[in-house]
Amino acid sequence: MKEKKMTHPVQKGVLSVLMNGILILFSLSCIFPIIWMIYSSLKEKRAFNANIIGLPKEPTLINYIRILSNSDYHLGESMWNSVRTTGLSIILIVLFSFIVGYILARVSFKGNRLLYMMFLMGMLIPIHSLLVPIYVVFKNCNMSNQWFTLLFPYVSFGLPMGIFLMEGYVKGIPVSLEEAAAIDGSSFSHTLWHIILPICKPILITIAIIQVFSCWNEFSFALVLIKDVHLQTVPLALTQFKGQFASDYPKQMAAMLITMSPIVVLYFAFSKQIIKGMVAGAVKG
Amino acid sequence: MLNSIKPKKSTILLYLLVPVAMFVFTVFVPLVTAFVYSFFEWKGGPVKTFTGLTNYVTLFHDSTFWEAFGHNIYLVVACIIGQIGIAFILVMMINSKLVKLKGMHRTFGFFPSTISAVCIGLIWNMIYHNQYGVLNWFLKSIGRDDLCKVWLNEPKLVMMLVSIPLIWQFIGYYMIIMLSAISSIDTEVFESAEIDGANGVQRAIYITLPLIKNTMLVCITLCIAGNMKAFDNIFVMTKGGPGTASMVMAMYGYQVSFNQSNMGYGSCISVGIFVLSLIVIGGSQALIKYITREKEA
Protein backbone atom coordinates (compact mmCIF):
# COMPACT_ATOMS: atom_id res chain seq x y z
CA MET A 1 0.00 0.00 0.00
CA LYS A 2 2.80 2.33 0.97
CA GLU A 3 4.76 1.46 -2.14
CA LYS A 4 1.81 2.19 -4.37
CA LYS A 5 1.48 5.65 -2.91
CA MET A 6 5.17 6.26 -3.44
CA THR A 7 5.12 5.45 -7.16
CA HIS A 8 1.87 7.25 -7.78
CA PRO A 9 3.28 10.73 -8.40
CA VAL A 10 5.93 9.32 -10.73
CA GLN A 11 3.34 7.36 -12.69
CA LYS A 12 1.21 10.44 -12.83
CA GLY A 13 4.13 12.44 -14.14
CA VAL A 14 4.89 9.93 -16.88
CA LEU A 15 1.24 9.72 -17.82
CA SER A 16 0.91 13.48 -17.93
CA VAL A 17 3.97 13.87 -20.17
CA LEU A 18 2.72 11.09 -22.43
CA MET A 19 -0.79 12.46 -22.80
CA ASN A 20 0.30 16.05 -23.28
CA GLY A 21 2.87 14.85 -25.77
CA ILE A 22 0.36 12.88 -27.84
CA LEU A 23 -2.14 15.72 -27.88
CA ILE A 24 0.44 18.31 -28.83
CA LEU A 25 1.65 16.04 -31.61
CA PHE A 26 -1.94 15.70 -32.82
CA SER A 27 -2.55 19.45 -32.74
CA LEU A 28 0.70 20.08 -34.58
CA SER A 29 -0.20 17.55 -37.25
CA CYS A 30 -3.43 19.44 -37.84
CA ILE A 31 -1.71 22.75 -38.22
CA PHE A 32 1.60 21.66 -39.73
CA PRO A 33 0.51 21.42 -43.37
CA ILE A 34 -0.69 24.99 -43.43
CA ILE A 35 2.45 26.27 -41.74
CA TRP A 36 4.58 24.31 -44.18
CA MET A 37 2.61 25.85 -47.02
CA ILE A 38 2.89 29.37 -45.66
CA TYR A 39 6.66 29.40 -45.44
CA SER A 40 7.19 27.29 -48.54
CA SER A 41 5.06 29.63 -50.61
CA LEU A 42 7.65 32.30 -49.84
CA LYS A 43 10.37 30.29 -51.59
CA GLU A 44 11.23 30.22 -55.23
CA LYS A 45 10.70 26.94 -57.01
CA ARG A 46 14.42 26.19 -57.14
CA ALA A 47 14.92 26.84 -53.44
CA PHE A 48 11.95 24.63 -52.61
CA ASN A 49 13.13 21.75 -54.78
CA ALA A 50 16.57 21.90 -53.18
CA ASN A 51 15.18 21.67 -49.66
CA ILE A 52 11.48 20.98 -49.27
CA ILE A 53 11.28 21.31 -45.52
CA GLY A 54 13.72 24.09 -44.62
CA LEU A 55 12.72 27.64 -43.87
CA PRO A 56 13.14 30.08 -46.74
CA LYS A 57 16.56 31.75 -46.79
CA GLU A 58 15.49 34.58 -49.05
CA PRO A 59 11.75 34.99 -48.51
CA THR A 60 10.02 36.42 -51.56
CA LEU A 61 6.47 37.27 -52.53
CA ILE A 62 7.15 36.52 -56.18
CA ASN A 63 4.75 33.56 -56.29
CA TYR A 64 1.88 35.67 -55.04
CA ILE A 65 2.69 38.48 -57.43
CA ARG A 66 2.88 36.11 -60.39
CA ILE A 67 -0.39 34.39 -59.57
CA LEU A 68 -2.35 37.54 -58.94
CA SER A 69 -0.95 39.51 -61.85
CA ASN A 70 -1.41 36.79 -64.47
CA SER A 71 -4.98 37.04 -65.72
CA ASP A 72 -4.78 33.56 -67.28
CA TYR A 73 -5.15 32.04 -63.83
CA HIS A 74 -8.49 33.79 -63.14
CA LEU A 75 -7.80 33.61 -59.45
CA GLY A 76 -9.37 36.96 -58.64
CA GLU A 77 -12.35 36.08 -60.77
CA SER A 78 -12.87 32.73 -59.08
CA MET A 79 -12.55 34.34 -55.66
CA TRP A 80 -15.28 36.79 -56.62
CA ASN A 81 -17.44 33.95 -57.97
CA SER A 82 -17.04 32.04 -54.73
CA VAL A 83 -17.75 35.09 -52.59
CA ARG A 84 -20.87 35.92 -54.60
CA THR A 85 -22.17 32.35 -54.70
CA THR A 86 -21.49 31.75 -51.03
CA GLY A 87 -22.93 35.11 -49.96
CA LEU A 88 -26.15 34.80 -51.94
CA SER A 89 -26.58 31.16 -50.94
CA ILE A 90 -26.26 32.01 -47.27
CA ILE A 91 -28.75 34.86 -47.53
CA LEU A 92 -31.27 32.64 -49.31
CA ILE A 93 -30.74 29.67 -47.00
CA VAL A 94 -31.20 31.80 -43.89
CA LEU A 95 -34.22 33.62 -45.34
CA PHE A 96 -35.96 30.47 -46.58
CA SER A 97 -35.15 28.45 -43.46
CA PHE A 98 -36.60 31.24 -41.37
CA ILE A 99 -39.83 31.50 -43.35
CA VAL A 100 -40.42 27.81 -43.97
CA GLY A 101 -39.26 26.73 -40.52
CA TYR A 102 -41.58 29.22 -38.85
CA ILE A 103 -44.59 28.33 -40.97
CA LEU A 104 -44.06 24.60 -40.49
CA ALA A 105 -43.79 25.06 -36.74
CA ARG A 106 -46.73 27.39 -36.19
CA VAL A 107 -49.28 27.43 -38.99
CA SER A 108 -51.60 24.48 -39.38
CA PHE A 109 -52.66 23.78 -42.92
CA LYS A 110 -53.25 20.73 -45.01
CA GLY A 111 -49.96 19.29 -46.10
CA ASN A 112 -47.94 20.83 -43.29
CA ARG A 113 -46.54 17.48 -42.16
CA LEU A 114 -46.16 16.35 -45.74
CA LEU A 115 -44.01 19.38 -46.50
CA TYR A 116 -42.02 18.78 -43.34
CA MET A 117 -41.38 15.18 -44.35
CA MET A 118 -40.34 16.31 -47.80
CA PHE A 119 -37.65 18.61 -46.44
CA LEU A 120 -36.61 16.00 -43.91
CA MET A 121 -36.16 13.55 -46.76
CA GLY A 122 -33.81 16.07 -48.30
CA MET A 123 -31.43 15.34 -45.43
CA LEU A 124 -31.67 11.60 -45.92
CA ILE A 125 -31.30 11.56 -49.70
CA PRO A 126 -27.71 10.75 -50.66
CA ILE A 127 -27.18 13.95 -52.62
CA HIS A 128 -24.12 12.68 -54.47
CA SER A 129 -26.44 10.39 -56.43
CA LEU A 130 -27.87 13.61 -57.89
CA LEU A 131 -24.54 14.54 -59.46
CA VAL A 132 -25.29 13.19 -62.93
CA PRO A 133 -29.07 13.77 -63.05
CA ILE A 134 -28.77 17.35 -61.86
CA TYR A 135 -26.44 18.01 -64.78
CA VAL A 136 -28.99 16.56 -67.21
CA VAL A 137 -31.89 18.57 -65.79
CA PHE A 138 -29.98 21.85 -65.64
CA LYS A 139 -28.60 21.37 -69.13
CA ASN A 140 -32.08 20.72 -70.53
CA CYS A 141 -33.46 23.81 -68.83
CA ASN A 142 -30.52 25.85 -70.08
CA MET A 143 -29.57 26.60 -66.52
CA SER A 144 -26.07 25.23 -66.28
CA ASN A 145 -23.15 27.60 -66.73
CA GLN A 146 -24.92 30.68 -65.41
CA TRP A 147 -23.84 32.92 -62.57
CA PHE A 148 -26.85 31.78 -60.54
CA THR A 149 -26.60 28.06 -61.37
CA LEU A 150 -24.86 26.97 -58.19
CA LEU A 151 -27.35 28.79 -55.97
CA PHE A 152 -29.90 26.09 -56.71
CA PRO A 153 -28.00 23.08 -55.37
CA TYR A 154 -26.34 24.99 -52.52
CA VAL A 155 -29.57 26.50 -51.24
CA SER A 156 -31.55 23.30 -51.72
CA PHE A 157 -29.00 21.13 -49.96
CA GLY A 158 -28.62 23.63 -47.12
CA LEU A 159 -32.33 24.16 -46.58
CA PRO A 160 -33.33 20.88 -44.88
CA MET A 161 -30.94 21.31 -41.98
CA GLY A 162 -31.76 25.00 -41.71
CA ILE A 163 -35.49 24.34 -41.64
CA PHE A 164 -35.02 21.55 -39.15
CA LEU A 165 -32.99 23.72 -36.76
CA MET A 166 -35.36 26.67 -37.19
CA GLU A 167 -38.49 24.58 -36.64
CA GLY A 168 -37.09 23.17 -33.42
CA TYR A 169 -36.12 26.64 -32.25
CA VAL A 170 -39.53 28.18 -32.95
CA LYS A 171 -41.24 25.40 -31.02
CA GLY A 172 -39.35 26.62 -27.96
CA ILE A 173 -40.83 30.12 -28.24
CA PRO A 174 -44.08 30.54 -26.27
CA VAL A 175 -47.11 30.98 -28.54
CA SER A 176 -48.51 33.59 -26.16
CA LEU A 177 -45.99 36.02 -27.62
CA GLU A 178 -47.60 35.92 -31.03
CA GLU A 179 -51.09 35.87 -29.54
CA ALA A 180 -50.33 39.06 -27.67
CA ALA A 181 -49.00 40.60 -30.85
CA ALA A 182 -52.15 39.58 -32.69
CA ILE A 183 -54.34 41.19 -30.04
CA ASP A 184 -52.35 44.36 -30.50
CA GLY A 185 -53.27 44.21 -34.17
CA SER A 186 -50.03 42.91 -35.63
CA SER A 187 -50.53 41.11 -38.94
CA PHE A 188 -48.93 37.76 -39.71
CA SER A 189 -46.16 39.30 -41.78
CA HIS A 190 -45.54 42.06 -39.27
CA THR A 191 -45.23 39.51 -36.46
CA LEU A 192 -42.95 37.39 -38.58
CA TRP A 193 -40.47 40.11 -39.46
CA HIS A 194 -40.61 42.37 -36.42
CA ILE A 195 -41.17 40.02 -33.52
CA ILE A 196 -40.02 36.54 -34.51
CA LEU A 197 -36.97 37.49 -36.57
CA PRO A 198 -35.08 39.24 -33.75
CA ILE A 199 -35.76 36.33 -31.39
CA CYS A 200 -34.43 33.81 -33.89
CA LYS A 201 -31.15 35.60 -34.52
CA PRO A 202 -28.95 33.05 -32.66
CA ILE A 203 -30.25 30.06 -34.59
CA LEU A 204 -30.07 31.94 -37.87
CA ILE A 205 -26.43 32.78 -37.20
CA THR A 206 -25.76 29.11 -36.45
CA ILE A 207 -27.35 28.14 -39.76
CA ALA A 208 -25.27 30.73 -41.58
CA ILE A 209 -22.02 29.54 -39.98
CA ILE A 210 -22.62 25.92 -40.91
CA GLN A 211 -23.40 26.84 -44.49
CA VAL A 212 -20.54 29.28 -45.08
CA PHE A 213 -18.06 26.45 -44.90
CA SER A 214 -20.01 23.95 -46.93
CA CYS A 215 -20.76 26.49 -49.70
CA TRP A 216 -17.24 27.87 -49.91
CA ASN A 217 -15.73 24.38 -49.99
CA GLU A 218 -18.26 22.64 -52.22
CA PHE A 219 -16.65 21.03 -55.22
CA SER A 220 -18.51 18.21 -56.91
CA PHE A 221 -21.62 20.09 -58.03
CA ALA A 222 -19.56 23.04 -59.20
CA LEU A 223 -17.46 20.60 -61.22
CA VAL A 224 -20.49 19.17 -62.97
CA LEU A 225 -22.53 22.32 -63.48
CA ILE A 226 -19.90 24.93 -64.34
CA LYS A 227 -17.82 24.60 -67.50
CA ASP A 228 -17.12 28.27 -68.18
CA VAL A 229 -13.72 29.24 -66.70
CA HIS A 230 -15.04 32.71 -65.93
CA LEU A 231 -17.69 31.26 -63.62
CA GLN A 232 -15.44 28.83 -61.76
CA THR A 233 -15.51 28.80 -58.00
CA VAL A 234 -12.34 28.52 -55.98
CA PRO A 235 -12.14 24.72 -55.55
CA LEU A 236 -12.58 24.28 -59.31
CA ALA A 237 -9.87 26.80 -60.09
CA LEU A 238 -7.51 25.00 -57.71
CA THR A 239 -7.85 21.68 -59.49
CA GLN A 240 -6.82 23.46 -62.67
CA PHE A 241 -3.76 24.95 -61.02
CA LYS A 242 -2.75 21.45 -60.12
CA GLY A 243 -2.38 20.69 -63.81
CA GLN A 244 -0.84 24.02 -64.72
CA PHE A 245 1.83 24.14 -62.03
CA ALA A 246 2.29 20.42 -61.67
CA SER A 247 5.89 20.73 -60.56
CA ASP A 248 5.81 24.22 -59.12
CA TYR A 249 4.76 23.55 -55.56
CA PRO A 250 5.44 26.96 -54.05
CA LYS A 251 3.13 28.52 -56.62
CA GLN A 252 0.42 25.91 -55.99
CA MET A 253 0.75 26.55 -52.27
CA ALA A 254 0.48 30.29 -52.74
CA ALA A 255 -2.69 29.84 -54.80
CA MET A 256 -4.20 27.54 -52.18
CA LEU A 257 -3.36 29.92 -49.37
CA ILE A 258 -4.99 32.81 -51.18
CA THR A 259 -8.19 30.83 -51.65
CA MET A 260 -8.14 29.50 -48.10
CA SER A 261 -7.43 32.88 -46.52
CA PRO A 262 -11.04 34.05 -46.00
CA ILE A 263 -11.96 30.77 -44.31
CA VAL A 264 -8.81 30.65 -42.21
CA VAL A 265 -9.22 34.23 -41.01
CA LEU A 266 -12.90 33.66 -40.29
CA TYR A 267 -12.11 30.47 -38.40
CA PHE A 268 -9.38 31.79 -36.17
CA ALA A 269 -11.30 34.99 -35.46
CA PHE A 270 -14.52 33.24 -34.43
CA SER A 271 -13.39 29.70 -33.67
CA LYS A 272 -15.45 29.36 -30.50
CA GLN A 273 -18.74 30.38 -32.10
CA ILE A 274 -17.98 28.40 -35.24
CA ILE A 275 -17.19 25.21 -33.33
CA LYS A 276 -20.34 25.65 -31.26
CA GLY A 277 -22.47 26.24 -34.34
CA MET A 278 -21.09 23.30 -36.27
CA VAL A 279 -21.60 20.96 -33.32
CA ALA A 280 -25.18 22.14 -32.88
CA GLY A 281 -25.83 21.55 -36.56
CA ALA A 282 -24.27 18.10 -36.56
CA VAL A 283 -25.94 16.81 -33.44
CA LYS A 284 -29.41 18.23 -33.97
CA GLY A 285 -29.34 17.67 -37.69
CA MET B 1 -50.22 25.62 -33.51
CA LEU B 2 -51.24 29.19 -33.91
CA ASN B 3 -54.95 29.86 -33.63
CA SER B 4 -55.30 33.48 -32.69
CA ILE B 5 -53.97 34.81 -35.99
CA LYS B 6 -55.12 32.85 -38.95
CA PRO B 7 -52.96 34.03 -41.80
CA LYS B 8 -54.57 34.03 -45.20
CA LYS B 9 -53.92 30.97 -47.30
CA SER B 10 -52.59 33.15 -50.08
CA THR B 11 -50.02 34.71 -47.74
CA ILE B 12 -48.72 31.31 -46.69
CA LEU B 13 -48.68 30.11 -50.27
CA LEU B 14 -46.72 33.16 -51.34
CA TYR B 15 -44.15 32.65 -48.61
CA LEU B 16 -43.70 28.96 -49.34
CA LEU B 17 -43.78 29.10 -53.13
CA VAL B 18 -40.19 30.01 -53.95
CA PRO B 19 -38.34 27.79 -51.45
CA VAL B 20 -40.51 24.77 -52.14
CA ALA B 21 -40.32 25.19 -55.92
CA MET B 22 -36.54 25.57 -55.77
CA PHE B 23 -36.16 22.53 -53.56
CA VAL B 24 -38.39 20.32 -55.66
CA PHE B 25 -36.68 21.42 -58.85
CA THR B 26 -33.14 20.68 -57.60
CA VAL B 27 -33.77 17.55 -55.57
CA PHE B 28 -36.84 15.69 -56.75
CA VAL B 29 -36.89 16.50 -60.45
CA PRO B 30 -33.35 15.12 -60.98
CA LEU B 31 -34.19 12.03 -58.96
CA VAL B 32 -37.17 11.25 -61.17
CA THR B 33 -35.17 12.13 -64.30
CA ALA B 34 -32.38 9.77 -63.32
CA PHE B 35 -34.89 7.02 -62.77
CA VAL B 36 -36.47 7.58 -66.19
CA TYR B 37 -33.20 7.82 -68.11
CA SER B 38 -31.83 4.74 -66.43
CA PHE B 39 -34.09 2.70 -68.73
CA PHE B 40 -32.59 4.25 -71.87
CA GLU B 41 -29.44 3.84 -73.85
CA TRP B 42 -28.29 7.41 -74.23
CA LYS B 43 -24.79 8.54 -75.17
CA GLY B 44 -25.44 12.19 -74.42
CA GLY B 45 -26.64 13.01 -77.94
CA PRO B 46 -30.18 13.53 -79.18
CA VAL B 47 -30.81 9.80 -79.65
CA LYS B 48 -32.32 7.93 -76.72
CA THR B 49 -33.38 4.30 -77.12
CA PHE B 50 -35.56 2.57 -74.59
CA THR B 51 -33.77 -0.59 -73.49
CA GLY B 52 -35.80 -1.60 -70.47
CA LEU B 53 -33.78 -3.17 -67.70
CA THR B 54 -30.62 -3.67 -69.79
CA ASN B 55 -28.71 -0.99 -67.87
CA TYR B 56 -29.63 -2.57 -64.56
CA VAL B 57 -28.52 -6.00 -65.74
CA THR B 58 -25.21 -4.50 -66.86
CA LEU B 59 -24.86 -2.72 -63.52
CA PHE B 60 -25.51 -5.92 -61.64
CA HIS B 61 -22.64 -7.63 -63.48
CA ASP B 62 -20.37 -4.57 -63.54
CA SER B 63 -17.37 -5.62 -61.47
CA THR B 64 -15.98 -2.07 -61.42
CA PHE B 65 -19.15 -0.73 -59.83
CA TRP B 66 -19.10 -3.36 -57.12
CA GLU B 67 -15.40 -2.82 -56.57
CA ALA B 68 -16.17 0.88 -56.14
CA PHE B 69 -18.95 0.03 -53.69
CA GLY B 70 -16.46 -2.12 -51.79
CA HIS B 71 -14.08 0.83 -51.61
CA ASN B 72 -16.86 3.00 -50.18
CA ILE B 73 -17.44 0.39 -47.51
CA TYR B 74 -13.68 0.23 -46.89
CA LEU B 75 -13.66 4.00 -46.34
CA VAL B 76 -16.66 3.79 -44.02
CA VAL B 77 -15.03 1.11 -41.87
CA ALA B 78 -11.61 2.78 -41.90
CA CYS B 79 -13.13 6.10 -40.91
CA ILE B 80 -15.34 4.71 -38.17
CA ILE B 81 -12.36 3.00 -36.61
CA GLY B 82 -9.87 5.76 -37.40
CA GLN B 83 -11.90 8.91 -36.86
CA ILE B 84 -14.27 7.93 -34.10
CA GLY B 85 -11.83 5.57 -32.38
CA ILE B 86 -8.92 7.99 -32.32
CA ALA B 87 -11.22 10.90 -31.51
CA PHE B 88 -12.58 9.02 -28.50
CA ILE B 89 -9.08 8.27 -27.19
CA LEU B 90 -8.06 11.90 -27.64
CA VAL B 91 -11.23 13.08 -25.93
CA MET B 92 -10.47 10.92 -22.92
CA MET B 93 -7.00 12.45 -22.74
CA ILE B 94 -8.23 16.02 -23.10
CA ASN B 95 -10.71 15.48 -20.29
CA SER B 96 -7.96 14.39 -17.96
CA LYS B 97 -6.92 16.93 -15.36
CA LEU B 98 -3.28 16.43 -16.29
CA VAL B 99 -3.60 17.94 -19.74
CA LYS B 100 -2.87 21.56 -20.47
CA LEU B 101 -3.70 23.76 -23.48
CA LYS B 102 -7.17 22.28 -23.94
CA GLY B 103 -8.41 25.30 -25.85
CA MET B 104 -5.54 25.07 -28.31
CA HIS B 105 -6.19 21.38 -28.98
CA ARG B 106 -9.82 22.16 -29.74
CA THR B 107 -9.09 25.04 -32.07
CA PHE B 108 -6.23 23.36 -33.93
CA GLY B 109 -7.85 19.95 -34.01
CA PHE B 110 -11.04 21.27 -35.54
CA PHE B 111 -9.22 23.37 -38.09
CA PRO B 112 -8.71 20.77 -40.87
CA SER B 113 -12.43 20.03 -41.09
CA THR B 114 -13.10 23.62 -42.16
CA ILE B 115 -10.77 23.34 -45.16
CA SER B 116 -12.17 22.16 -48.48
CA ALA B 117 -11.64 18.56 -49.49
CA VAL B 118 -9.93 19.84 -52.63
CA CYS B 119 -7.27 21.67 -50.60
CA ILE B 120 -6.82 18.69 -48.31
CA GLY B 121 -6.39 16.43 -51.32
CA LEU B 122 -3.84 18.77 -52.91
CA ILE B 123 -1.91 19.10 -49.66
CA TRP B 124 -1.70 15.34 -49.26
CA ASN B 125 -0.73 14.96 -52.89
CA MET B 126 2.24 17.11 -52.02
CA ILE B 127 3.00 15.06 -48.95
CA TYR B 128 2.93 11.82 -50.98
CA HIS B 129 4.83 13.21 -53.97
CA ASN B 130 7.79 11.02 -54.89
CA GLN B 131 10.27 13.83 -55.48
CA TYR B 132 9.13 16.77 -53.37
CA GLY B 133 6.91 15.02 -50.81
CA VAL B 134 7.37 15.20 -47.08
CA LEU B 135 6.84 11.46 -46.70
CA ASN B 136 9.76 10.50 -48.91
CA TRP B 137 11.85 13.30 -47.41
CA PHE B 138 11.21 11.81 -43.98
CA LEU B 139 12.11 8.29 -45.13
CA LYS B 140 15.32 9.57 -46.66
CA SER B 141 16.27 11.53 -43.59
CA ILE B 142 15.96 8.42 -41.41
CA GLY B 143 18.06 6.56 -43.95
CA ARG B 144 15.38 4.33 -45.45
CA ASP B 145 15.71 5.37 -49.08
CA ASP B 146 14.68 1.85 -50.06
CA LEU B 147 11.13 2.52 -48.83
CA CYS B 148 10.59 5.58 -51.02
CA LYS B 149 7.90 5.10 -53.63
CA VAL B 150 5.64 6.88 -56.03
CA TRP B 151 3.06 6.34 -53.33
CA LEU B 152 -0.21 6.92 -55.15
CA ASN B 153 0.79 4.56 -57.97
CA GLU B 154 0.74 1.53 -55.71
CA PRO B 155 -2.57 -0.29 -56.32
CA LYS B 156 -2.30 -2.19 -53.06
CA LEU B 157 -1.60 0.84 -50.91
CA VAL B 158 -3.70 3.45 -52.59
CA MET B 159 -6.93 2.91 -50.64
CA MET B 160 -5.05 3.18 -47.39
CA LEU B 161 -3.25 6.29 -48.59
CA VAL B 162 -6.43 8.08 -49.62
CA SER B 163 -8.20 7.18 -46.40
CA ILE B 164 -5.46 8.67 -44.22
CA PRO B 165 -6.25 12.29 -45.23
CA LEU B 166 -9.96 11.62 -44.76
CA ILE B 167 -9.40 10.24 -41.29
CA TRP B 168 -6.97 12.98 -40.37
CA GLN B 169 -9.27 15.74 -41.57
CA PHE B 170 -12.24 14.81 -39.40
CA ILE B 171 -10.74 13.48 -36.16
CA GLY B 172 -11.04 16.96 -34.66
CA TYR B 173 -14.63 17.26 -35.81
CA TYR B 174 -15.74 14.13 -33.98
CA MET B 175 -13.53 15.04 -31.06
CA ILE B 176 -15.40 18.32 -30.63
CA ILE B 177 -18.81 16.66 -30.91
CA MET B 178 -17.90 14.12 -28.23
CA LEU B 179 -16.36 16.79 -25.98
CA SER B 180 -19.56 18.80 -26.08
CA ALA B 181 -21.56 15.69 -25.20
CA ILE B 182 -19.27 14.88 -22.28
CA SER B 183 -19.36 18.42 -20.95
CA SER B 184 -23.08 17.99 -20.37
CA ILE B 185 -22.51 14.99 -18.08
CA ASP B 186 -22.63 15.76 -14.38
CA THR B 187 -19.04 15.84 -13.10
CA GLU B 188 -20.15 14.18 -9.85
CA VAL B 189 -20.47 10.92 -11.76
CA PHE B 190 -16.78 10.96 -12.59
CA GLU B 191 -15.76 12.08 -9.14
CA SER B 192 -17.65 9.30 -7.38
CA ALA B 193 -16.23 6.77 -9.83
CA GLU B 194 -12.74 8.02 -9.08
CA ILE B 195 -13.35 7.70 -5.35
CA ASP B 196 -14.56 4.14 -5.94
CA GLY B 197 -11.19 3.45 -7.52
CA ALA B 198 -12.04 3.27 -11.21
CA ASN B 199 -9.01 4.12 -13.34
CA GLY B 200 -9.07 6.25 -16.46
CA VAL B 201 -9.65 3.42 -18.91
CA GLN B 202 -12.41 1.91 -16.80
CA ARG B 203 -14.11 5.26 -16.46
CA ALA B 204 -13.94 5.74 -20.22
CA ILE B 205 -15.47 2.37 -21.06
CA TYR B 206 -17.99 1.86 -18.28
CA ILE B 207 -19.11 5.40 -17.55
CA THR B 208 -18.41 7.84 -20.36
CA LEU B 209 -19.16 5.56 -23.29
CA PRO B 210 -22.64 4.49 -22.12
CA LEU B 211 -23.51 8.08 -21.20
CA ILE B 212 -22.61 9.50 -24.59
CA LYS B 213 -24.00 6.53 -26.50
CA ASN B 214 -26.47 8.62 -28.45
CA THR B 215 -23.78 11.07 -29.53
CA MET B 216 -21.59 8.17 -30.63
CA LEU B 217 -24.46 6.90 -32.78
CA VAL B 218 -24.81 10.33 -34.35
CA CYS B 219 -21.07 10.29 -35.08
CA ILE B 220 -21.26 6.86 -36.68
CA THR B 221 -24.21 7.91 -38.81
CA LEU B 222 -22.42 11.06 -39.93
CA CYS B 223 -19.35 8.99 -40.71
CA ILE B 224 -21.27 6.48 -42.83
CA ALA B 225 -23.20 9.13 -44.73
CA GLY B 226 -20.05 11.17 -45.26
CA ASN B 227 -18.03 8.32 -46.70
CA MET B 228 -20.71 6.90 -48.95
CA LYS B 229 -20.44 10.18 -50.84
CA ALA B 230 -16.63 10.31 -50.98
CA PHE B 231 -15.71 12.05 -54.20
CA ASP B 232 -13.74 15.28 -53.84
CA ASN B 233 -10.64 13.78 -52.24
CA ILE B 234 -10.54 10.90 -54.67
CA PHE B 235 -11.06 13.18 -57.65
CA VAL B 236 -8.16 15.39 -56.64
CA MET B 237 -5.77 12.71 -55.46
CA THR B 238 -6.13 9.74 -57.81
CA LYS B 239 -9.20 10.12 -60.06
CA GLY B 240 -9.95 6.52 -59.06
CA GLY B 241 -6.61 5.20 -60.23
CA PRO B 242 -4.24 3.56 -60.70
CA GLY B 243 -6.66 1.61 -62.88
CA THR B 244 -9.68 1.28 -60.66
CA ALA B 245 -7.72 0.67 -57.49
CA SER B 246 -9.25 3.63 -55.64
CA MET B 247 -12.54 3.97 -57.53
CA VAL B 248 -15.54 4.98 -55.45
CA MET B 249 -19.16 4.96 -56.58
CA ALA B 250 -19.60 8.70 -57.16
CA MET B 251 -16.30 8.80 -59.07
CA TYR B 252 -17.38 5.92 -61.28
CA GLY B 253 -20.73 7.53 -62.00
CA TYR B 254 -18.91 10.72 -62.93
CA GLN B 255 -16.46 8.94 -65.25
CA VAL B 256 -19.10 6.91 -67.05
CA SER B 257 -21.33 9.95 -67.52
CA PHE B 258 -18.81 12.61 -68.43
CA ASN B 259 -15.65 10.93 -69.70
CA GLN B 260 -17.42 8.20 -71.65
CA SER B 261 -20.55 10.40 -72.04
CA ASN B 262 -22.73 7.38 -71.40
CA MET B 263 -25.54 9.31 -69.75
CA GLY B 264 -28.07 6.49 -69.77
CA TYR B 265 -25.82 4.10 -67.89
CA GLY B 266 -24.60 6.99 -65.75
CA SER B 267 -28.19 7.64 -64.67
CA CYS B 268 -28.53 3.97 -63.87
CA ILE B 269 -25.39 4.13 -61.72
CA SER B 270 -26.87 7.19 -59.96
CA VAL B 271 -29.97 5.20 -59.10
CA GLY B 272 -27.68 2.41 -57.90
CA ILE B 273 -25.74 4.82 -55.67
CA PHE B 274 -29.02 6.17 -54.31
CA VAL B 275 -30.40 2.76 -53.44
CA LEU B 276 -27.14 1.34 -52.05
CA SER B 277 -26.48 4.40 -49.90
CA LEU B 278 -29.97 4.26 -48.45
CA ILE B 279 -29.57 0.55 -47.76
CA VAL B 280 -26.20 0.99 -46.07
CA ILE B 281 -27.31 3.98 -43.99
CA GLY B 282 -30.67 2.43 -43.10
CA GLY B 283 -29.17 -1.00 -42.51
CA SER B 284 -26.48 0.29 -40.20
CA GLN B 285 -29.08 2.25 -38.24
CA ALA B 286 -31.17 -0.87 -37.80
CA LEU B 287 -28.11 -2.90 -36.85
CA ILE B 288 -27.01 -0.36 -34.26
CA LYS B 289 -30.48 -0.26 -32.77
CA TYR B 290 -30.58 -4.03 -32.63
CA ILE B 291 -27.19 -4.33 -30.94
CA THR B 292 -27.81 -1.62 -28.36
CA ARG B 293 -31.25 -2.99 -27.54
CA GLU B 294 -29.85 -6.42 -26.80
CA LYS B 295 -27.29 -4.97 -24.44
CA GLU B 296 -29.93 -3.17 -22.44
CA ALA B 297 -32.07 -6.29 -22.12
Image: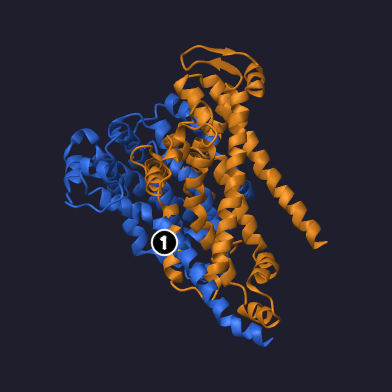
Chain colours: A blue, B orange
Secondary structure of residue under mark 1: helix
Q: Nearer the viewer, residue A157 or B216?
A: B216
| Quadrant position of the N terminus of chain A in the picture | bottom right
Report x, y in % for residue A273. Answer: 42, 65
Q: How busy is the neighbourhood of tag 1: few (under 14 within 10 Å), some, or many (20 plus)? A: many
Q: Is residue A285 left or right of residue B287?
A: left
Rendered image quadrant of residue A82: top left
Pick the quarter of the image with the C terminus of chain A. bottom right
Residue tagged 1: B108
Query: What is the residue that sits farthest to the front in this orientation?
Result: B143
Furthest-right residue in view? B297
Task: Please state if B201 lies on the left or on the right of A182 as rendered.
Answer: right
Name above or below for residue B78 compared with residue B85. above
Q: Position of residue B79 (x, y in %)?
A: 57, 48
Residue at 78 percent of width and 57 percent of height:
B293
Quadrant for residue A74, please give it.
top left
- The number of numbered badges drawn on the structure is 1
Q: Residue at x 19, y 35 (%)?
A: A71
Q: Nearer the viewer, residue A106 or B85?
A: B85
For image coordinates 28% across by 32% down, the residue present is A244
The structure residue drawn at horizontal position 66% and vertical position 78%, both measured from the top left corner, is B189
Q: Residue type at mark 1?
A: Phe
